[in-house]
Image (cartoon, rainbow, N blue to C red):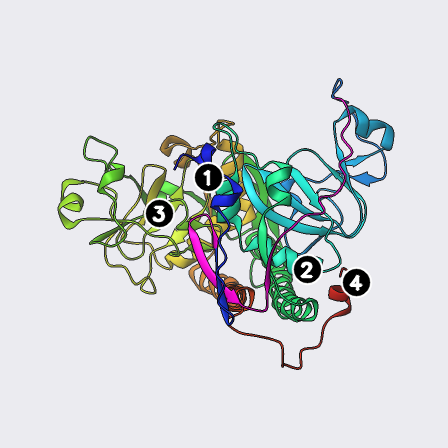
Amino acid sequence: MNEKEVTLNEFIEVSDSPERQSVRWGPTKKTIPGDWNFDPIVNHTSEIIYPQRDKPTRFDGDIPWVRIEDLDGVYISEPIDGERYVSRELMGEMNLRSFPEGTLMCSCSTTMGVCAITTRELLSNQTFAGIVTRDSINTHYLYYAISDCAEELDQLATGSTISYLSSDKLENFHIPVPPLEEQRKIASVLYTVDQMIQKTEKVIEKVRSVRAGIEQDVFTNGYYGHENTKEVRLGPIKTSIPNDWSLKTIPDKFDIIDGDRGKNYPKQSEFCEDGYCLFLSANNVTKEGLEFHETEFISKEKDAELRKGKLSRGDIVMTTRGTVGNFGLYDEEVDYDNIRINSGMVILRPKSRVTNPEYYYYFFRSQIFQKQINAMSYGTAQPQTSVTDLKKMGLIEPRDNEKEKIKELIENVHTIIYSNRENRKELQHLKKGLMQDLLSGTVRTTDTNIEVADEITQYG
């Protein structure tokens, strides 16, 4: 079926079973309890749309103007950067829409179904539609129901270059509607998990901030609290280090190895979900090290055709294009025995006399080294750095016993972050499972003693 030919009637199908009824949204067919309704969202908020005139050069006022990147969680009240405040006079010049308190803002352009509830009047553009629920639908329940239907909303969107979901289609989009009290209980369960996730994220950010302070201190003043320091030039930047420390360059300690970018570089058709050799992507080398939630592989035969670019234990991977300066350590904790880098990475392989490569791994990730990377990267659309630039970047060299202490200190903080990130992952997995069960009515909350939060009843 051509995407542009899709109509609402082709998305809605309800059976007459008294116990469970079958409903269909686009490619997805589900069943819901027979005592639930399957109703359109309706009650689209009134839109305040102003004529487009010359764009202003200044933002001053008291009404926040939000963008899709500001939506991160159930609520939204202020822009992240705190700088986009628009006056009522200025909003007319910017073609902005007003979203009153209690409105569910829903993205309806390019990325469908990203939602948040406003806790004060906000402004945005045509990227969002605003939904004011009717009395029979709780706003928090609707938030979770729409968040669970992004794929179905995508199917209703039209447009080739930029996809867009029209107001009519959004208003008439059908969702499962349990009795109101059950909606509140479902929303309360999911909201409680969301709060736990957000608290865990705050702990992670706090510990990251502590880690950055520790790194700044130990890489400039030392672990043992040296009395005297000296100012030095580390590549293109200035810093201070203890008097008895020295400076090195990356080539003094590491061989810099590119991947194989020749004729045998894998084509898209040669990647598979499972195989002999893991082929790293940008998703695998993150700000927190190597991660393997998304993986792709090449065959043993394809691996044999490639020359350089294969990892050995103890190697450090660095991203050099796109997101520059993410690092991963290929140590014994990594489960994969065969790994290759892609064309936007290099391998930093410790030379034979190098001890404690973990120290350098943590130093590479510190703000001191990242400042060197930022100063020596080039390109705006796709930032990158070169092997030539890497050879000029400096390393801080404490004495070996102090190196080990610095490594242990930062590693301990990193372990706390890792533990909380794993906890967050488990909570996100729990939430996903709960959404599948609760929003389909597979698990009912009808006869359970669930305390409904005041925040939930405030909006329906």
Q: Are marks 3 and 1 in contact (CB under 8 Å)?
A: no
Q: Can you tell which of label 3 and label 1 is closer to the viewer? A: 1
Determine whether, in the image, residue 246 is placed left or right of residue 113.
left
Give the CA distance from mark 3 to mark 1.
21 Å
Badge 2: residue crowd in 10 Å (few <14, some 14–19, many ≥20): many
Q: Which residue is mark 1?
A: 324
Residue 458 image label: 4
Determine whether, in the image, residue 460 is placed left or right of residue 40.
right
Is 230 colored magenta in this rendering? no
Give the CA distance from mark 2 to mark 4.
9 Å
Q: Provide residue 128's location: percent of width, then percent of height.
A: 66, 39
Q: Which residue is mark 2?
A: 140
Q: Can you tell which of label 3 and label 2 is closer to the viewer? A: 2
- What amino acid is at disc 2? His
Is 25 colored magenta in this rendering? yes
Give the CA distance from mark 3 to mark 2.
55 Å
Q: Provide residue 117's location: percent of width, then percent of height.
A: 71, 52
Determine whether, in the image, residue 173 is placed left or right of residue 65.
left
Q: Which residue is mark 3?
A: 253
Q: Mark 2 or mark 4: which comes first in sequence?
A: 2
Q: Mark 4 or mark 3: which comes first in sequence?
A: 3
Q: Can you tell which of label 1 and label 2 is closer to the viewer? A: 2
- What amino acid is at disc 3? Lys
Give the CA distance from mark 4 to mark 3.
61 Å
Examine the rendering and report whether any part of residue 429 can be seen.
no
Give the CA distance from mark 1 to mark 2.
39 Å
Which quarter of the figure is the C terminus placed in?
A: bottom right
